[in-house]
Amino acid sequence: MKAKLKGYISMNSLAGVYDVFVTYDTTDPHVSEWVMRNLRVKLEEEGEKHLPLCLEERDWLPGVPLVDNLAQSIRYSRKTLFVLTEGYVKTGVFKMAMYLAHQRLLDENVDVIVLLMLEPVLQHSHFLRLRRRLCEKSVVEWPRTAAAQPWFWQNLRNVVRVDNQVMYNKTYSKYFTSK
């Protein structure tokens, strides 16, 4: 019932292919509100091209196991956007979603990961440093000033639309890409 009120769309339908699956801390009311009121509006409703999002609170099938919903969301979306906060990076949901997104890279040779740093997290992470070195544009940070927000939204739209392998650092990509 809750999913139906929020505009539920079945992922089993042909129209259920999304541009972006957004994974975030649904237990944090501030993050959930930011995703629903800002991120969703800016990507789905504003701009010259609307980007359909897959959101856990709106589009997941009720009663389906978490792992199945995560796997389907990542599989049926062109990109997976991780909205990172200090609390979220410590959860099992984050770790499972990251694992499944990496599994898609290994199985299909498709890099779908985009990291949105809502808070400064993982600053000493080897993964984050490697990610920035290989595909810097796939790591975006929420701006500290309101004046930079229009640029942030345009940059995020561009990152979500473009294939990550096109954005790879050319120095490193020749060693591990087939293109």
Image (tube, rainbow, N blue to C red):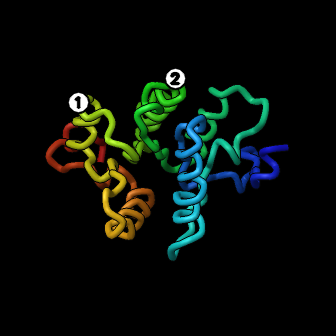
Label 2, label 1: how far apart the Cα atoms are: 20 Å
**Quarter occupied by residue 37:** bottom right
Tag 2 residue? 92
Q: Quick one: 106 or 30, which is closer to the camera?
A: 30
Amino acid under disc 1: His
Mark 1 neighbour density, 10 Å: few (under 14) some (14–19) many (20 or more): few
Q: Can see residue 107?
A: no
Residue drawn at x 44%, y 25% is 90
Give the quarter of the figure containing the N terminus: top right
Q: Is residue 112 above or below residue 123?
A: below
Residue drawn at x 37%, y 43% is 119
Q: Is residue 41 above or below residue 171?
A: below
Looking at marks 2 and 1 on the same chain, the residue that comes earlier in the sequence is marked by: 2
Mark linked to residue 73: none
Q: Is residue 75 above or below residue 155?
A: above
Residue 94 in percent (x, y) is at 49, 30
Q: Residue furthest right?
A: 1
Residue drawn at x 41%, y 64% is 153
Residue 69 in percent (x, y) is at 66, 34
Amino acid under disc 2: Gly
Q: Residue furthest left?
A: 171
Residue 116 in percent (x, y) is at 40, 47
Q: Can see residue 127?
A: yes
Q: Residue furthest top?
A: 92
Badge 1 element: loop
Residue drawn at x 18%, y 42% is 172
Q: Quick one: 44 or 134, which is closer to the camera?
A: 44
Tag 1 residue? 124
On the picture, is 42 further left or further right than 148? right
On the picture, is 126 further left or further right than 114? left
Residue 44 in percent (x, y) is at 58, 64
Q: Quick one: 147 or 160, which is closer to the camera?
A: 147
